[in-house]
Amino acid sequence: MKVGVIGSGGREHAICLGLKNSSKIEKIYCFPGNAGTSEVAENVILNLDDFENIKNFILDNQIDLIVVGPEKPLVDGLVDFLEQFNIKVFGPNKIASQLEGSKIFTKQLCQKYNIPTAKFGIFQNKQDAKKFLEKTAYPIVIKADNLASGKGVYICNDDKEAQIAVNEIFDGKFGLAKNLLIEEFLNGEEMSYFIVSDGLIYKNFGTAQDHKRVLEGDRGKNTGGMGAYSPSRLISEDIESKIINKIIKPTLKGLAEHGTRYKGFLYAGLMIVNNEPFLIEYNVRMGDPECQTILPKLKTDLSEVFLACCNQSLDKVNLDWQNKKSLCVVVCSNGYPDEFKKNIKIENLKSINLRSQDYLFHAGTTKKNDEVYATGGRVLSFVSLSDNFNEAKMSITKNLDKLNWSGGFFRKDIGYKVIK
Ligand code: AMP
Ligand code: GLY
């Protein structure tokens, strides 16, 4: 079977590597991929906004299955477009992708189906938003209603910060903003909960704890994610049953009543407050770096999972996991998430010896003349599986020491809540 993976991050490298382990896969294409995916797949440089071109490449090369990694092509309707040509695609359609594409769509679904989430208001212009702020108590959360790679969210501690947020969002800092949300601040601990669904049934796909802030001690700006560990320390049978019954099931029911089915990974970003889960946001894909953290634990053939979701036969697949702790540390270019230099050589990659439960996934990297250069903000993810988080961390630290790269940095405290 030939499979195509869309995307270029650590998540997509982890997916390519998972597929590589399947005896059913004869060839993997990655659109456009990175230096890491080029080791296991053929990287294909195509404009991801040009659906016609993508479709032609898939048909010309007789690719049997497409897996969409990132949210943008999903929200833009790539799945709906390719399915018109009988191409099998793993990922949700355009309507279901509104769960990530429009925070207001999700909030309205939460309201209708009583899904626990922060109280909120929707505002269409600066004036109305600022009028509301006059009588509000702080902290408060202000969000742009469009895809902003996790950056369109402001936690405001006073009126001055709130004014800046409202101005920046409506002035188009994250693209054209028709709406803005003002939300109650939820004080708790975050957790990422994943499922995979074929549109008929769903299965739990693990939990993780991301570290979104750029600086140690969870300070500084929000990023795409600086590291993660799995499972989340918060998961228990009681919490899981609340997540499923109060959040996941009503969401899938709501989508069904909306006339659509959910196929693909669904990622619930949750805040756990006094042992009760609240939905902060949905993402219609695996997380990055959560994907790199969770996938190495999967024993089941990944291609079988994707195919079963496309064929509505997920009930016949048994998801089998290694009972291990997994930790992931992301190495970023100096300056990220602000401006950073590109095309910085990563010298010591070849000196890293990965042990059997160690993984190194590439994100913003490119290969030139057999040398690897950093071209993106998040560059590499180091992952290790072990019986405990301490050992996983020690393994990663050894590899990071060997890397010793002056062009980048990483958070040394990833997993601090589970590591003594
Ligand atoms: P989002 O892009 O919606 O996941 O938001 C980014 C981050 O902002 C989240 O991971 C949380 O850390 C934080 N956040 C978002 N909404 C809230 C909220 N209502 N209360 C507290 N923190 C929030
Ligand atoms: N790690 C957060 C995300 O993928 O959105």
Image (tube, grey):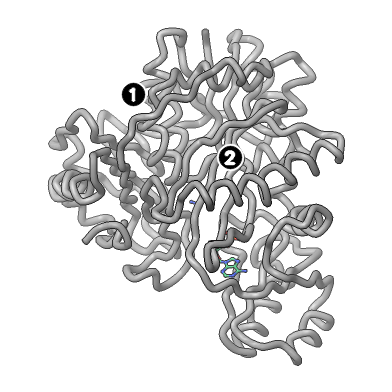
Left or right relative to 315: residue 3:
left
Residue matched to label 2: 285
Distance (Cα) linking label 2 and label 1: 24 Å
Element on which disc 2 rests: loop
Residue 39 image label: 1
- In the image shown, does 48 or 230 lie closer to the viewer? 230
Residue at point 56%, 22% (across, down): 306
- In the image shown, does 374 or 402 lie closer to the viewer? 402
Q: Which amino acid type is marked by label 2?
A: Arg
> Can you tell me whether the CB of the residue at mark 2 lies under 8 Å from the nearest atom of ligand 2?
yes
- In the image shown, does 98 or 59 lie closer to the viewer? 98
Residue 175 spot, x, y in % from top left: 69, 60
Residue 294: quarter of image: top left
The answer, for residue 192, to whether it is visible in the render is yes
The answer, for residue 47, to whether it is visible in the render is no
Residue at point 41%, 33% (across, down): 295
Residue 75 spot, x, y in % from top left: 71, 42
Residue at point 80%, 69% (across, down): 122
Residue 100 spot, x, y in % from top left: 68, 49
Quarter, ligand 1: bottom right
Local crowd size for mark 1, using a 10 Å CA cut-off: few (<14), some (14–19), many (≥20): few
Local crowd size for mark 2, using a 10 Å CA cut-off: few (<14), some (14–19), many (≥20): many
Q: Nearer the viewer, mark 2 or mark 1?
A: 2
Give above or below for 313 relative to 383. above
Q: Which amino acid type is marked by label 1?
A: Glu
